[in-house]
Amino acid sequence: MRIIKNTLQMQKIALGHIKNSDEIGLVPTMGALHEGHISLIAKSKKRDDITIVSIFVNPTQFGPNEDYLKYPRNTKKDLEICRESHVDYVFMPLVGDMFPANHKTFVEVEILQDILCGKFRSNHFRGVVTVIVKLFNISYADRSYFGMKDFQQLKIIEKMVKDLNFRTKIIPCPIVREESGLAISSRNSYLSIEEKKTSENISRILKEASEDFKIKDLNFVKEIVLSKLKKIPESKIDYAEVVDFNDLSLADESTRKVVFAIAVWIGQTRLIDNTIMIKQTK
Ligand code: AMP
């Protein structure tokens, strides 16, 4: 496994592999790697000749009052995980190399970037999309792996790839959960033991909603979810919304495949989760 810190060097290495007809898989991460990331890496290892994992806590996707500085960083453990997962290259650029002071270009995906999480985190997706565009150009990825935990992010990247004719194929990967149902996230490390217990309600409520959705009206299911979420102690709901699986537009009774997406604060920690729900045809 090679650790590459320089963007130009990574680009040269990747281009060498492309010339060699190797297929490249990219797993973009912000580090603090866990089972969720490992599942993405495993998918790439199965399919691609070369697996690149990028580890970069991207400052442009954090708001001024968000957790950029305290975001968990553990390079030693991350590298161990990558080694154990037989990653070929870990790309760990410095902030100044990715976003020098004179960086001026940003990529935006209109409308999709302003709904759900975008309503509460302005400029977040602009930062995400821009860094992903850069990583695609640096890695020459044939495929790139994204978790469905960040469902809006996945849909926005898919749209960007389509709109801008990128050759990289986006591979969606299922949410990896703890036994309790809690979606695994680097930010779970912020939670106290008590808060973690409380957080487990989120996935339970979503699971119950997907059962209810089979037989009950959409608005009714939404109301039940909201009332259950409100009862979680020390919590604050950013949103609990049902959207069309395909384009994130607001779902109505006629939408067959929907995503119930939730963002909730448990104490000082913002958690997101979602579930895909399919209407049974009568
Ligand atoms: P992050 O390091 O949080 O930016 O996440 C990097 C990638 O891992 C993103 O595509 C995430 O959606 C994905 N990911 C994070 N947590 C999970 C999880 N629990 N299950 C599946 N994918 C995940």
Image: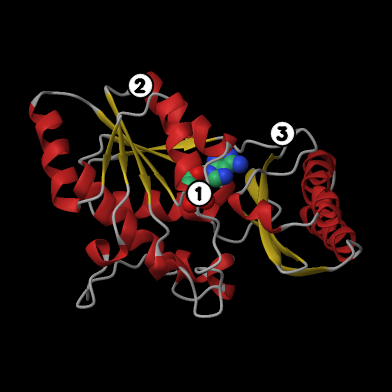
**Amino acid type at mark 2:** Arg
Disc 2 versus disc 3: nearer the observer = 2
In the image, farthest residue toward the front? 76
Q: Where in the figure is residue 111, as x and y percent of width and height? A: 45, 69
Residue 47 numbered tag: 2
- Pick the residue in front: 207 or 5: 5
**Amino acid type at mark 1:** Asn
Q: Where in the figure is residue 125, as x and y percent of width and height? A: 44, 65
Disc 1 CB within 8 Å of nearest ligand 1 atom: no
Does residue 22 appear to the left or right of 252 in the view shown? left
Q: Residue placed at 62% from the left, 48% from the top? A: 185
Q: Residue placed at 20% from the left, 51% from the top? A: 6
- Pick the residue in front: 202 or 51: 51
Judge whether 282 appears above or below 269 on screen.
above
Q: Where in the figure is residue 34, as x and y percent of width and height? A: 57, 39
Q: Which residue is mark 1?
A: 74
Residue 253 numbered tag: none
